[in-house]
Image: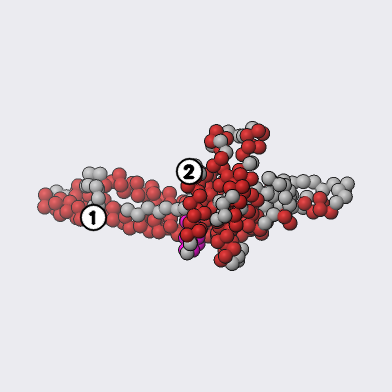
Amino acid sequence: MYKETFDFYDRTSLKSYNLDQTMRYQLNMLDRLDAFTRKHCENVGDLTCRLCEHLHCNKGFTEYCTICGYLHDIGKQFIPPEILQKPAKLTDEEYKIMKTHTTIGYDMCMKDIKLQPYAAGPYYHHEALDGSGYPQGLTKKDIPYEAQIIRVADEYDAIVSKRQYKSHIGISDTLKILIENTKPHQQIHKSDALSVVAENTKLGKNNPAIVRVLFKVVIEDIEYEIFLTQSYVEELKEELKRLKQVEKYKIAMDKAKKEKDKNYYLEGMKVLLKNDETPENFQSTYEEYKKAYETRKAIIENLYHEIKIIKKLRV
C-alpha cells in the first residue's frame, strides 16, 4: 500500500535545471564530506535555490547562489572529526578551529579554477549583518547578497536537522529563532560618535527580507505535506471501507447456522482480502489502518494550525 513520504527540500527547482559538466564537477566535490555534512550542504543548496526564486532572482544568479550553497561547508572536510561530530558544546578552542572551515573552504575554491567563482559561499556564509559574524566580522554593506541568502538557509537547516523534524508540526518555533536573529542585540549608547556604529546596532544577524521569504517557502512545504498526507488518508479510507465490509461478512459468517451460508460469507471475505490478510488476522490490519487514519487526520489538522501560526509571525 502507498505510504506518504515527505522531504523538506523535495520541491527545489534545481532538479529541473540543465546542469552542465562544470556544475556537476562542483557538486561532486561534496563526495569528500562526511555523510551528515554532505546532506546538510545538499539541503542548504536546495533551500538557497528556492529562496532565490521567491526573491525573484534571475536564473543565472539563482544557479550561482545554489552552487555556492552546496559548497558553503566544503572546508569542513579538514576539520578534525572529533570536533566536527562532537555532540556536546564545543570549547572555545574547538570553536576557534571549527570557524576555520570558512577560510579553508575559500582557499580550496581559489586554488581550483572551476571553483573560484563560488568562493563567496564558503567564505561569507557565517558573516552577520551586525558585524558579529566571522571570519572577518563584516557588516551588511560588505556582505555579498548570496551570502546573506545562504546564511538564512544554513541556519534554518541546522536547526531542523538538530531537532530531527519528521513533519512541519512545530516548525514555527524554528522560524521564531530566525526572527530573533533579525533583531539588533547591541545597545545604542549616546556616546557612540560614529554613525556607522549606531547604524550597525540597528541590525540583527539575518536579513529580514530573506527570512520573510523563508516563511513562504515553509508554508509551501507544509501545504505539500498536507497534500501528501491527505492523499494517504484517502487511500486509508478506501482500505477501511474494504475491511469494514470484510468485518460484516465475518460477523454474518459467525452468526450463520448453515454450512452453505458460512461458505458464502467466507468466499466474500476472501475476495476482499489482500496480500497476507486472512479471515483470522484481518482484524489486526483493520485496527492498524484505523489508527493510521486518525493519526494522519490529526497531523493534517496540526499542519493547518502551523500555517496559521506562521502567517501571524512578523519580522
Percent position of residue 178, x then y: 64, 50
Percent position of residue 78, x then y: 56, 40
For numbered disc 1, what is the local secondary structure?
helix
Residue drawn 11% across and 49% down? 259
Q: Is residue 313 visible to the viewer in this orientation of the structure?
A: no
Q: Which amino acid does label 1 sit on?
A: Leu
- What are the residue bounds of the magenta stretch? 9-17
Nearer to me, 246 or 172:
172
Residue drawn 49% across and 45% down? 32
Percent position of residue 80, x then y: 56, 36
Which of the numbered marks, if any, corresponds to residue 272? 1
Q: What residue type is labelled 2?
A: Ala
Q: Is 95 one of the magenta-colored residues? A: no
Quarter assignment of residue 238: bottom left
Number of residue marks: 2
Question: Marks 2 and 1: which is nearer the front?
Answer: 2
- The residue wearing badge 2 is 35
